[in-house]
Amino acid sequence: MLSTSEDRTKAVGDVINCLGEELIPGIRDELYPVTSSFGASAFFSLERAAAPYFGIKAYGVHMNGYVERGNQKYLWIGKRSKVKPTYPGKLDHLVAGGLPHGIPCGENLVKECERRSWHTKIYCQPMIRCFCLLRAKAVGAVSYSDIDGYRFKRDVLFCYDLELPDEFVPKNEDGEVESFKLVPVTHVANIIRSTQLFKENCNLVIIDFLFRHGYIKPEELGYLKLLQSLRSGDCT
């Protein structure tokens, strides 16, 4: 009798371990909560890599790290490592990550900042934590669903903006990011419009940034349809 969340988590985990990397690639021993809605009690927790194979709704955090110079904004863009098991070589946000079980959004954002992108000569670890907690602004969420082979992704991404000082230069330490580049926002928009270089869900978060910062105006054809598409998934 699987009467507790812990019992159910263990039972499902045993099944995932039996399936193994051949059927569920990218297993990383990171648990996602299985809930009816965000913040609700978890029925059980599931290996992150397995979530889309079961159609489980997952949550994540994405941060637009930007610099303002004069009248122009620039976004820090990362390029994922070519040996990463998921979306190798794709363009990505400065900071992004899935939301594991039991970690609040803000704390997870700080964790991702410390892990991925903020090891610079300018900022020590305590400064990184304070800077991110105090300056990163929660600005909403986007949602989507996508079928890719045997995977049915149902994701909600909490969006953050962080204006960075001019002297900030990110450096990755965990090998997941090949490089970072500071790119004018208008150029980023053109990349999204005309290529498939970005990891797909990053497109939604950046387009949301473009709306909020006035780069996409109501006079443009398809304005409302594009705006609506940013929350096409189950945003609960």
Image (spheres, helix red, strand yellow):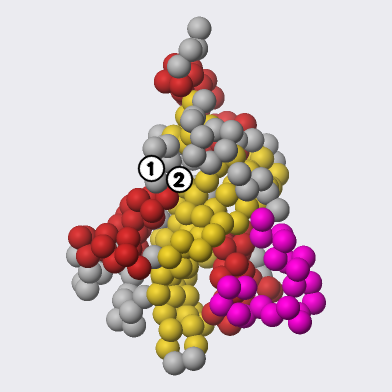
Q: Residue 103's mark? A: 1
In magenta segment, residue 213? yes
- Tag of residue 216: none
Q: Position of residue 106 (x, y in %)?
A: 38, 53
Tell me the residue at 62%/52% (across/down). 143
The quadrant in which residue 213 appears is bottom right
The residue at the point 47 percent across, 80 percent down is 74
Image: 96 above or below 163: above
Q: Which residue is mark 2?
A: 99
Residue 180 placed where, x, y %? 41, 70
Question: Which amino acid, mark 2?
Answer: Leu
Q: Is residue 226 magenta?
A: yes
Q: Residues within 10 Å of mark 1 (few under 14, many from 20)?
A: few
The location of residue 205, given as percent across then percent down, is 57, 63
List the single residue furthest toward the front: 40
| Element at label 1 | loop
Judge whether residue 172 can be spotted in this image: no
Q: Nearer the viewer, residue 97 or 224?
A: 224
Q: Which image quadrant for residue 231?
A: bottom right
Question: Residue 105 or 113: which is nearer the viewer?
Answer: 105
Q: CB of mark 2 within 8 Å of CB of mark 1?
A: yes
Magenta span of residues: 211-231
The amino acid beneath tag 1 is Ile
Numbered disc total: 2
Nearest the viewer among 82 and 192 is 192
Q: Residue at position x 43%, y 84% from top?
A: 68
Q: Is residue 44 left or right of residue 203?
A: left
Dot 2 falls on a residue whose secondary structure is loop
Q: Return the residue found at the far top.
A: 1
